[in-house]
Amino acid sequence: PIVRGKVAAVGTTSFTLIRGVATITVDVSPSTTYADTAVSAASLSTLAQNERVAVVGTVAGTNLVDATEVRILPVRPIVRGKVAAVGTTSFTLIRGVATITVDVSPSTTYADTAVSAASLSTLAQNERVAVVGTVAGTNLVDATEVRILPGQSAAHRHARAAVGRRDGRDDRRQPGHRPH
Protein backbone atom coordinates (compact mmCIF):
# COMPACT_ATOMS: atom_id res chain seq x y z
CA PRO A 1 0.00 0.00 0.00
CA ILE A 2 1.03 3.55 -0.67
CA VAL A 3 -0.85 4.97 2.29
CA ARG A 4 -2.93 3.85 5.25
CA GLY A 5 -5.21 6.03 7.30
CA LYS A 6 -8.68 6.78 8.60
CA VAL A 7 -11.41 7.97 6.22
CA ALA A 8 -12.38 11.58 6.97
CA ALA A 9 -14.95 12.18 4.20
CA VAL A 10 -16.35 10.41 1.15
CA GLY A 11 -17.23 12.18 -2.10
CA THR A 12 -18.48 10.95 -5.47
CA THR A 13 -15.08 10.41 -7.15
CA SER A 14 -12.71 10.63 -4.22
CA PHE A 15 -12.36 10.40 -0.46
CA THR A 16 -10.05 12.01 2.05
CA LEU A 17 -8.16 10.22 4.73
CA ILE A 18 -6.17 11.29 7.74
CA ARG A 19 -2.67 9.94 8.25
CA GLY A 20 -1.10 11.47 11.33
CA VAL A 21 -1.57 15.21 10.84
CA ALA A 22 -1.80 15.02 7.02
CA THR A 23 -5.04 15.02 5.03
CA ILE A 24 -4.69 12.99 1.84
CA THR A 25 -7.08 13.02 -1.11
CA VAL A 26 -7.60 9.64 -2.76
CA ASP A 27 -9.01 9.82 -6.29
CA VAL A 28 -10.85 6.71 -7.49
CA SER A 29 -12.04 5.61 -10.91
CA PRO A 30 -14.48 3.01 -12.24
CA SER A 31 -11.55 0.55 -12.41
CA THR A 32 -10.61 1.00 -8.74
CA THR A 33 -11.24 -2.22 -6.82
CA TYR A 34 -12.37 -2.48 -3.20
CA ALA A 35 -11.81 -5.22 -0.64
CA ASP A 36 -13.84 -5.39 2.57
CA THR A 37 -14.39 -8.63 4.47
CA ALA A 38 -17.55 -7.17 6.05
CA VAL A 39 -19.26 -6.20 2.75
CA SER A 40 -19.88 -8.53 -0.19
CA ALA A 41 -19.89 -5.80 -2.87
CA ALA A 42 -17.61 -3.09 -1.50
CA SER A 43 -17.40 0.20 -3.39
CA LEU A 44 -16.86 3.89 -2.82
CA SER A 45 -20.51 4.17 -1.74
CA THR A 46 -20.00 1.58 1.05
CA LEU A 47 -16.95 3.38 2.40
CA ALA A 48 -17.71 5.14 5.70
CA GLN A 49 -16.19 7.89 7.77
CA ASN A 50 -13.68 6.68 10.41
CA GLU A 51 -12.99 3.36 8.64
CA ARG A 52 -9.32 2.44 8.42
CA VAL A 53 -8.10 1.81 4.87
CA ALA A 54 -4.97 0.85 2.95
CA VAL A 55 -4.69 2.36 -0.52
CA VAL A 56 -2.72 0.92 -3.44
CA GLY A 57 -2.04 3.20 -6.41
CA THR A 58 0.26 5.96 -7.56
CA VAL A 59 1.27 9.27 -6.04
CA ALA A 60 -0.32 11.97 -8.21
CA GLY A 61 0.89 15.00 -6.29
CA THR A 62 1.37 16.38 -2.81
CA ASN A 63 -1.16 14.63 -0.54
CA LEU A 64 -2.86 13.15 -3.63
CA VAL A 65 -3.12 9.47 -4.61
CA ASP A 66 -4.76 7.82 -7.63
CA ALA A 67 -6.13 4.57 -6.22
CA THR A 68 -6.14 1.26 -8.06
CA GLU A 69 -7.24 -0.65 -4.94
CA VAL A 70 -8.80 0.33 -1.61
CA ARG A 71 -8.66 -2.21 1.22
CA ILE A 72 -10.98 -1.58 4.15
CA LEU A 73 -9.15 -2.83 7.22
CA PRO A 74 -10.87 -4.73 10.03
CA VAL A 75 -12.04 -2.69 13.00
CA ARG A 76 -9.69 -2.99 15.93
CA PRO A 77 -11.11 -4.11 19.25
CA ILE A 78 -11.16 -1.46 21.96
CA VAL A 79 -10.75 -3.97 24.77
CA ARG A 80 -9.73 -7.59 25.25
CA GLY A 81 -10.14 -9.67 28.35
CA LYS A 82 -11.52 -12.76 30.05
CA VAL A 83 -15.28 -13.10 30.63
CA ALA A 84 -16.06 -12.96 34.36
CA ALA A 85 -19.88 -13.15 34.26
CA VAL A 86 -22.68 -13.13 31.69
CA GLY A 87 -26.02 -11.37 32.22
CA THR A 88 -29.07 -10.83 30.04
CA THR A 89 -28.02 -7.51 28.43
CA SER A 90 -24.35 -7.32 29.35
CA PHE A 91 -21.31 -9.23 30.48
CA THR A 92 -18.28 -8.33 32.55
CA LEU A 93 -14.74 -9.02 31.64
CA ILE A 94 -11.45 -8.80 33.47
CA ARG A 95 -8.56 -6.93 31.90
CA GLY A 96 -5.59 -6.95 34.23
CA VAL A 97 -6.98 -5.67 37.51
CA ALA A 98 -9.92 -3.80 35.94
CA THR A 99 -13.47 -5.14 35.71
CA ILE A 100 -15.21 -3.82 32.59
CA THR A 101 -18.94 -3.97 31.89
CA VAL A 102 -19.79 -4.64 28.25
CA ASP A 103 -23.34 -3.65 27.31
CA VAL A 104 -24.81 -5.44 24.28
CA SER A 105 -27.88 -4.79 22.17
CA PRO A 106 -29.93 -6.81 19.68
CA SER A 107 -27.69 -5.42 16.91
CA THR A 108 -24.44 -6.59 18.57
CA THR A 109 -22.79 -9.28 16.44
CA TYR A 110 -20.80 -12.23 17.73
CA ALA A 111 -17.98 -14.15 16.05
CA ASP A 112 -16.92 -17.57 17.31
CA THR A 113 -15.30 -20.09 14.98
CA ALA A 114 -16.49 -22.97 17.20
CA VAL A 115 -20.18 -21.97 17.32
CA SER A 116 -22.36 -21.48 14.24
CA ALA A 117 -24.87 -19.15 15.94
CA ALA A 118 -22.82 -17.33 18.57
CA SER A 119 -24.70 -14.97 20.86
CA LEU A 120 -24.62 -13.54 24.37
CA SER A 121 -26.15 -16.78 25.62
CA THR A 122 -23.25 -18.83 24.20
CA LEU A 123 -20.61 -16.79 26.04
CA ALA A 124 -19.08 -18.55 29.01
CA GLN A 125 -17.05 -17.58 32.02
CA ASN A 126 -13.27 -17.55 31.43
CA GLU A 127 -13.54 -17.20 27.63
CA ARG A 128 -11.15 -14.66 26.17
CA VAL A 129 -12.88 -12.06 24.01
CA ALA A 130 -12.10 -8.97 21.97
CA VAL A 131 -14.78 -6.27 21.95
CA VAL A 132 -15.42 -3.71 19.22
CA GLY A 133 -17.58 -0.74 20.16
CA THR A 134 -17.44 2.60 21.92
CA VAL A 135 -16.38 3.67 25.37
CA ALA A 136 -19.56 4.68 27.21
CA GLY A 137 -17.97 5.63 30.54
CA THR A 138 -15.38 4.53 33.05
CA ASN A 139 -15.02 0.75 32.71
CA LEU A 140 -18.11 0.67 30.46
CA VAL A 141 -18.24 -0.30 26.76
CA ASP A 142 -21.19 -0.40 24.33
CA ALA A 143 -20.39 -3.39 22.09
CA THR A 144 -21.11 -3.54 18.38
CA GLU A 145 -19.16 -6.79 17.97
CA VAL A 146 -17.87 -9.46 20.34
CA ARG A 147 -15.16 -11.78 19.03
CA ILE A 148 -14.53 -14.97 20.98
CA LEU A 149 -10.84 -15.62 20.47
CA PRO A 150 -9.98 -18.84 18.58
CA GLY A 151 -9.50 -21.95 20.65
CA GLN A 152 -11.00 -20.28 23.69
CA SER A 153 -14.74 -20.87 23.32
CA ALA A 154 -16.73 -23.03 25.71
CA ALA A 155 -18.00 -25.08 22.76
CA HIS A 156 -14.43 -25.70 21.62
CA ARG A 157 -13.36 -26.76 25.11
CA HIS A 158 -16.43 -28.99 25.45
CA ALA A 159 -15.85 -30.61 22.05
CA ARG A 160 -12.22 -31.24 22.92
CA ALA A 161 -13.17 -32.82 26.30
CA ALA A 162 -15.83 -35.01 24.65
CA VAL A 163 -13.38 -36.57 22.19
CA GLY A 164 -11.97 -38.89 24.85
CA ARG A 165 -9.42 -41.59 24.24
CA ARG A 166 -8.95 -43.67 21.11
CA ASP A 167 -10.22 -46.79 22.92
CA GLY A 168 -13.50 -45.00 23.71
CA ARG A 169 -12.91 -44.72 27.45
CA ASP A 170 -13.45 -41.40 29.17
CA ASP A 171 -10.16 -39.47 29.22
CA ARG A 172 -11.15 -37.13 32.05
CA ARG A 173 -9.39 -37.78 35.29
CA GLN A 174 -11.46 -39.22 38.15
CA PRO A 175 -10.54 -38.68 41.82
CA GLY A 176 -7.97 -41.29 42.75
CA HIS A 177 -7.34 -42.24 39.09
CA ARG A 178 -3.71 -42.71 38.12
CA PRO A 179 -2.55 -42.87 34.51
CA HIS A 180 -1.10 -46.26 33.47
Image: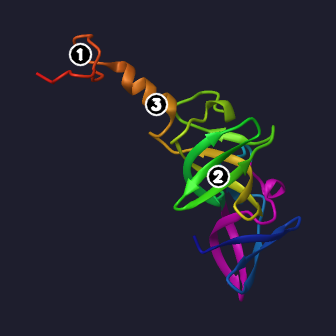
Relative to 178, does residue 166 appear above or below in the rendering? above
Work out whether residue 70 or residue 84 is closer to the camera in this orientation and state it: 84
- The residue at which mark 3 appears reads as 156
Give the side of residue 120 with respect to residue 176, left or right: right
Q: Which residues are magenta?
A: 42-70
- Give the amino acid at mark 3: His
Q: CA distance from mark 2 to mark 1?
A: 38 Å
Q: Residue 33: percent from the left, percent from the top?
A: 69, 56
Dot 1 amino acid type: Arg
- The foreground one among 45 and 163 is 163
Which residue lies under the disc numbered 1? 166
Sequence-earlier tag: 2 or 3: 2
From the image, which quarter does the C terminus lie in?
top left
Q: Residues within 10 Å of mark 2 (few under 14, many from 20)?
A: many
Mark 1 lies on a secondary structure that is loop
**Could you classify mark 3 by the number of other residues whose Cα lies within 10 Å: few (under 14), some (14-19), or many (20 or more)?**
some
* 96 relative position to 123: left or right: left
Residue for badge 2: 131
